[in-house]
Image: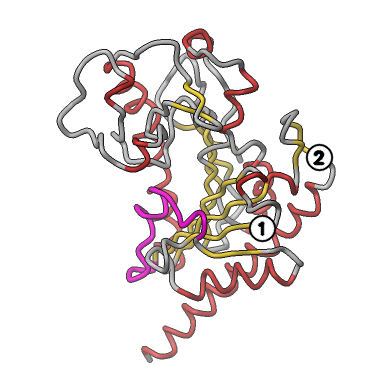
Amino acid sequence: MNEPGGRADPDFQPPFEVIEPERLSAPLVFDSPHSGARYPSAFLAASRLDPLTLRRSEDAFVDELFLPCVALGAPLLRARFPRAYLDVNREPFELDPRMFDGPLPEYANTRSLRVAAGLGTIPRVVGDAQPIYRGRLQVAEALARIAALHRPYHQRLAGLIERTRARFGVVVLVDCHSMPSTLAEAGSLDMVLGDRFGASAAPWAMEALEQALLARGYRVRRNKPYAGGYIAERYGLPAVGRHAVQIEVNRALYMDEARMVKLDRAAALVESLKAAAEAVASRAMAELAGESWAAE
């Protein structure tokens, strides 16, 4: 079942959606925060880049790669707005003062490493540091985007996570992303798994995901060059049974990066990702059963 969500917005109707399983039967939640591909006309007009270049920052088709995992009995939350417009894998107010025509609120985080790189909540650049905008933005525009998109997205994600944890006693959030093949260390990596160096998930969660992917022949590394962003940091709290793992998939495995087209070979990847997710769900329930037995 598709469930739309978020405030009314003429450019995004709705800004995100939840694909629900027929029955909640797995202690997993999937989210795809960077696969949105709906670009408002006003945003395109304000950009100095052509639409295809803007799309280079998308995790294109990632929501489709993980969509079959819903059949395991877990929801998938996917953004419809593009990452270049607003990035929900950032703090709510990671903002670059160089982008705006006027002072930012005192509570804005203007000094993070992500802001310095031009990749704040409202990104300044895409791709290989290409500036997005022709001129400066109004501060009110940034705050409006955050209120309409960032806040509702995280409210919905937090609700899905807590619902699943309440149902099973444990939840694993799989935060789904892709990486350009040029950043996958010259093609030597197929996937990077991030748990913020053990802070956002128990060891068993990473082990289950990693072993399932290795068994299918993928080249996998942990936490380098991606250890997990704001989503993993915010929602991963293993001490209370809330685990968050970020997965980055090499785009060359499933798409033509130059033309932004999904390829037929994506089908094999989809099957492997579903099998890996199933392995994580089984391990989560086994760990929970072990804890119950030990408590008795």
Q: Bounds of the magenta span?
A: 224-241
Q: Amino acid at mark 2?
A: Leu
Q: Residue 55: x, y in percent? A: 61, 27
Report helix, strand or loop for mark 1. Answer: loop
User: Quick one: quadrant of the N terminus?
Assistant: top right
Q: Earlier in the sequence, mark 2 or mark 1?
A: 1
Question: Which corner quadrant of the image does residue 3 belong to?
Answer: top right
Nearer the observer: mark 2 or 1; the answer is 1
Q: Which residue is mark 2?
A: 263
Residue pictured at 15% horizontal, 30% vertical:
106
Q: Residue 202: x, y in percent? A: 44, 72
Report helix, strand or loop for mark 2. Answer: loop
Q: Residue 253: x, y in percent? A: 75, 49
Residue pictured at 45% horizontal, 54% vertical:
228
Residue pictured at 34% horizontal, 52% vertical:
234
User: Quick one: quadrant of the C terminus?
Assistant: bottom left
Q: From the viewer's perspective, is residue 46 above or below residue 155?
A: above
Question: Which corner quadrant of the image does residue 152 belong to?
Answer: top left
Residue closest to the eye, 153 or 296: 153
Query: How far separated are the C-alphas under marks 2 and 1?
Result: 19 Å
